[in-house]
Structures are given as structure tokens and as C-alpha cells.
Image (spheres, helix red, strand yellow):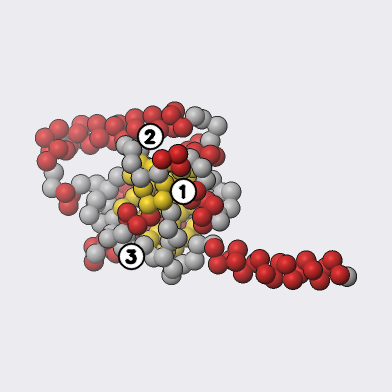
Amino acid sequence: MMRTTLFILLLGMLLPQFIQAQPVEGEPIPPVELKEENGGRLGGGAWQCSDVKGKPCLLVLIDPDRQELLGPVEAALENSRLSATEGFLVKVMDTQSSWKPDGMIQAGAWLGQMAGKFNEARENGIVQALFTERKNKPATWSVVYDQNNVFRKTLRLNDSPVHIFLLDKRGVIISYHSGRPTSTDARVWVRILKQLGSTA
């Protein structure tokens, strides 16, 4: 009886702290900074959540080996023709979740970005791809690396391979999703992103 009471008291003390640390819709995303040994941008340099303020943002924490889970999101973005002025797209690669060395993951992401630029040039013509007005540029994923579970630990996220945050231009969480997104989810997020981006 004494052990049970002690357990309930301990749970009562810890549970509110755990719940408060979870991502909460309507509140700013907790500050996360990735730099040096903890990770950072694909091209080098530090990254922090405040970097995405000013435009709405679709922010994804993803296991690099499970990027196929973002298929519905990629399809919704493709169909929406989201422009770079309407919102940010950020992929935080949780490299601790992968068996691959960090260098291999980064090389794959770099090649993916180069392939995207090549396809844009091929489809639109090299000159047009280089000099298209910024407002017509399609939004593309910025890739960030989390090499020590900083993002997951700070937000106390579960071990799901994908966590998706829709943020407004102030960095406030509009929607949070853990696990495989559906096509319906993705279309709603992208529609909201475009609506917010057009009024930003």
C-alpha cells in the first residue's frame, strides 16, 4: 500500500512536467539550436528554430532511412506549387536514428538537392531557372542535421520516425503530428501553409 501511494505521488509530480514539455498547439515551438558537434545546416553553420520566423513553416523531424513516409506530404507540395515566398520547408534529419554514417546521409541529401536544381533547369530552361523572379521560385526543403537527438530530447518526442509541425510566421505551433501522415493530413497542412503565406 505504501509503495502504491508513493508511486502515485511520484507520478503526480512528474507527469505535469512531462506533459508541459510535449509540443502544444497554440504555443511557440521550444527553442532548439543545432551547431558544431550537434549538427546544423547542410552547407555548414548553425541552425535554430527562430530561423524560420517571418513565414509559415512546415518543419519535419525525420529518420533519414524512413523518408518514404513523407510521400503524401511531397505529393501535396508538388500539387500545390507552393512558392518560396509562401513558406519555409525544413527537414531535420535525426541521424541518431539511422545506421548510416553522418557523412553518407549528408552526401545523399546534397545529391538530392543538386538533382532538384538540375530538374528545374531542365524543365524551365537554364536561364529561366537562374533568373526566375523570387516570387515564382518553388519552395524547396532546407536540410538540417541533428546528430545528438537534441530536437527529440528538447521537445520530449516519442521514438516515431517522423514528427511534423506546422508553424505560423511567429513560430507558433498550429498543428503537430507524430507518425505516418495521410494524404488528407498533408493536403490540409499545405492548404493552410499557402493561406498563411499569401497573407504574410
Residue at 45% over, 39% down: 37
Q: Quadrant of the C terminus?
A: bottom left
Q: Real-space Cα distance between discs 1 and 3? A: 19 Å
The residue that label 2 is drawn on is: 109
Label 2 crowd bin: few (<14), some (14–19), many (20+), radius 10 Å: some
Q: Nearer the viewer, mark 3 or mark 2?
A: 3
The residue labelled by disc 1 is 61
- The picture quadrant where one finds residue 113 is top left
Residue 186 figure quarter: bottom left
Q: In the rendered view, would you say 189 is above or below 118?
A: below
Residue wearing tag 3: 170
C-alpha distance separating marks 3 and 2:
28 Å
Helix, strand or loop at label 3? It is: loop
What is the C-alpha distance between the residues marked 1 and 2?
A: 14 Å
Q: Secondary structure at mark 1?
A: strand
Counting residues from the start of the chain, the first of labels 1 and 2 encountered is 1
* Residue 69 visible here: no
